[in-house]
Amino acid sequence: MKVSITVNGQERTDDVEPRMLLAHWLRDACGLTATNIGCDSTSCGACTVVVDGLTVKSCTVLAAQTDGAQVTTLEGLAGPDGELHPVQAAFRAEHGLQCGFCTPGMVLAAIGVLADNPDPSDREVREGLEGNLCRCTGYHNIVRAVQAAAQAGPAAGQVPQAQ
Ligand code: FES
Ligand code: FES
């Protein structure tokens, strides 16, 4: 079936199998491989993207379901001059990543946390990110990064297309 999806501000029209997952379409058709697939079963959050302002696990959504939607992946966060999104910058500054596999999903999920709550407590960050698993960091620096990003103000809870 034909779909038209705006990905990182660029509209793409494609023929997709009705059963194709959004995660596979982003990686295989769009070449946006920052969207990782860790479990394929809604458990790990590595595939988290933003669809029309809401964070979703893209292994749980069909590409066809996002027909007409705005999708943001990690590749869409930095500015045209390479300036990092406040959440990306905070993950870097606070050492919120090690191997990096969970990081694209963590960053996008963190933006969702900050969109709902611009000044989250330690516990609120942990609850907001409970659908995203990290096997490396022990989560402490991730929580610290999200709270540091909150200091950047409303931009930390926004994706570029929504600004
Ligand atoms: Fe989607 Fe794990 S790959 S939640
Ligand atoms: Fe390795 Fe999170 S940094 S899984």
Image (cartoon, rainbow, N blue to C red):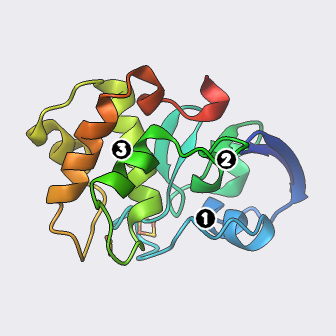
Vertical comparison of 88 with 9: above or below: below
State yes or no: Cβ of the residue under disc 1 lies below 8 Å from any atom of ligand 1. Answer: yes
The residue tagged 3 is 110
Q: Quadrant of the N terminus?
A: bottom right
The residue tagged 1 is 23
Location of ligand 1 given as a quarter of the image: bottom left
Q: Secondary structure at mark 3?
A: helix
Which mark is in front, 3 or 2? 3
Picture residue at 17% right of the left edge, 47% below the top: 126
State yes or no: Cβ of the residue under disc 2 lies below 8 Å from any atom of ligand 1. Answer: no
The residue tagged 2 is 65
Picture residue at 54% right of the left edge, 43% below the top: 50
Q: Is residue 39 visible?
A: yes
Front residue of this view, candidates 20 and 119: 119
Q: Secondary structure at mark 1?
A: helix
Of pointers 2 and 1, the one earlier in the residue sequence: 1
